[in-house]
């Protein structure tokens, strides 16, 4: 079946602009996660959704970052007033339920802020 | 998140050799996981460990959950060219967020 998909695969933007990154989880998965992976590093947790609600957003670096999942399926990560330090690969993962159920990762969106 | 120390940072080996990498943490985890990431892809789960002392195999891969719950290792036996990639350890505590190491880059020459 279809895995986690993310669009766009690449996004280049200018400093100060607003960007939206989309994640389509595996159908039926109630849990959705966003991670950020900088060059040469492992992924870092940003936010976790259980259904429509953000159960934990403690990993969001500051208030320029926001994510939604209005219908409990597709999620959008929104970054306002982008900075060069926001450049990274943004990974989305989904799992059948929360807890320790396996997280399946998408291919990521590579964001470059010029 | 918690810091995981993963070593070695990179390995360059010949096909057929065995490989070992490990991960340590200053914090206790309830679950240890090992992922492989290919270029342009997300991490893919290789092995999950749920109990201290557990030793689990998946084909040529073997991983162990350390007794102290602060470490884990991954062994790959008889490496082949398609083993090339970046291997990440990840620890999970009572929550759901995965705490990743910095990765071990593996290169295998024929």
Image (spheres, coloured by chain):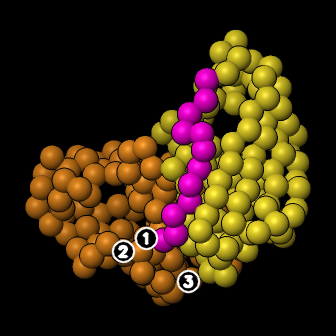
Chain colours: A orange, B yellow
| Residue range corresponding to the magenta coloring | B1-12
The answer to which quarter of the image holds residue B100 is bottom right
The chain ID associated with circle 1 is A
Say which residue appears at 88% left-offset and 62% top-offset: B54
User: Can the viewer see residue B9 in this picture?
Assistant: yes
Say which residue appears at 42% left-offset and 81% top-offset: A57
Using the image, tell me which numbered label, if any, was put on residue A51: 3
Relative to residue A41, is residue B69 drawn left or right? Answer: right
Mark 1 or 3, closer to the camera: 1
- Residues under numbered marks 1 and 2 in contact, where contact means CB atoms less than 8 Å apart: yes
- Dot 3 crowding, Cα within 10 Å, few <14, some 14–19, many 20+: some
Q: Quadrant of the C terminus of chain B?
A: top right
Same subunit, labels 1 and 2: the answer reads: yes
Pointer 1 residue: A46
- Residues under numbered marks 1 and 3 in contact, where contact means CB atoms less than 8 Å apart: no
With respect to residue B68, does B81 lie above or below? above
Q: Distance between the residues labelled 2 and 3?
A: 18 Å
With respect to residue B1, does A88 lie above or below? above
Residue A72: x and y in percent read: 52, 80
Pointer 2 residue: A60
Residue A104 within the magenta-colored segment of the rendering: no
């Amino acid at each position: 079946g279809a895995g986690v998909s993310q669009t766009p695969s690449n996004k280049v933007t200018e400093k100060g602009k607003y960007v939206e990154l989309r994640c389509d989880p595996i159908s039926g998965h109630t849990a959705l996660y966003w991670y950020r992976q900088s060059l040469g590093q492992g992924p870092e947790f940003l936010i976790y959704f259980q259904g429509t609600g953000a159960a934990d957003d403690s990993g969001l670096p500051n208030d320029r970052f926001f994510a939604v999942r209005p219908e409990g399926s597709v999620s959008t990560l929104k970054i306002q007033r982008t900075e060069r330090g926001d450049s990274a690969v943004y990974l989305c993962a989904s799992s059948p339920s929360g807890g320790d159920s396996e997280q399946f990762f998408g291919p990521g969106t590579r964001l470059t802020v010029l | 998140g918690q810091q995981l120390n993963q070593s070695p940072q990179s390995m360059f080996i010949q096909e057929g050799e065995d490989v070992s990498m490990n991960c340590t943490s200053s914090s206790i985890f309830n679950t240890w996981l090992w992922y492989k990431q290919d270029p342009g892809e997300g991490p893919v789960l290789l092995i999950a460990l749920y109990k201290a002392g557990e030793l689990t195999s998946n084909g040529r891969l073997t991983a162990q959950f350390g007794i102290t719950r602060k470490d884990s290792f991954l062994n790959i036996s008889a490496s082949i060219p398609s083993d090339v990639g970046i291997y990440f350890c990840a620890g999970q505590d009572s929550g759901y967020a995965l705490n990743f190491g910095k990765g071990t880059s593996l290169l295998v020459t024929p």
